[in-house]
Amino acid sequence: MAFTLTSTAFVNGATMPQAQVYSGMGETGGNLSPPLAWKDAPAGTKSFVVTLYDPDAPTGSGWWHWVVINIPAGITALPEGAGSGKGGLPEGALQLRTDFGVPGYGGAAPPPGRVHRYILTVTALDVPKLDVPAEATPAMIGFMLNQHHLASAQITVLYGHDRK
């Protein structure tokens, strides 16, 4: 069985719904983290990390929209809004600072012009917890993920506009 990630809000390759688009930076979305579910994590999984990343952001290093670490191995889903202060994050899970400068979910907010890819990833880790400070950067988490990665599953959604 393959490790898979799904959402009832969208499918791989779909356009991100307005409910998940950022509210700010010229956007008027709901800024709700999407509902996520995963299954068939590999044997030996001790925790999960969920990230949302835009590799197309015009920064030279992409844009991290959401980073949740220390999700216990027994958890296989997050409800809509869990990353947006609506409740539902499991005990022990920690949202870290994103490229918006604060912890929590931040939806799509690309500049006008091209469509961006938003890659949601759940990563299974071989450790029960990433021991990092609450102010750890997404780059630090990326480094830690590479050290403890067992498997990952992804959904890529798209968002863009021509507004001036």
Image: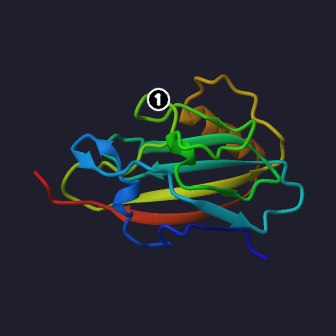
Q: Is residue 60 above or below residue 76?
A: above
Q: Which of the 4 quarters of the picture holds residue 6?
A: bottom right
Q: Is residue 8 above or below residue 75?
A: below
Q: Is residue 91 above or below residue 164?
A: above
Residue denoted by label 1: 102
Q: Which of the 4 quarters of the picture holds residue 8?
A: bottom right
What residue type is disc 1 on?
Val
Residue occupying the far left of the picture = 164
x then y, percent, for residue 61: 42, 41
x then y, percent, for residue 40: 78, 69
Quadrant location of the N terminus? bottom right
- Horizontal relation, residue 161 to residue 117: left or right: left
Helix, strand or loop at disc 1?
Answer: loop
Q: Is residue 143 above or below residue 78?
A: above
x then y, percent, for residue 124: 75, 54
Residue occupying the far right of the picture = 44
Residue occupying the far front of the picture = 86
Q: Nearer the viewer, residue 9 or 137?
A: 9
- Horizontal relation, residue 49 to residue 24: left or right: right
Q: Which of the 4 quarters of the picture holds residue 69?
A: top right
Residue plotted at (75% across, 38% down): 91
Residue plotted at (82% across, 54% down): 74
Residue plotted at (50% across, 51% down): 33
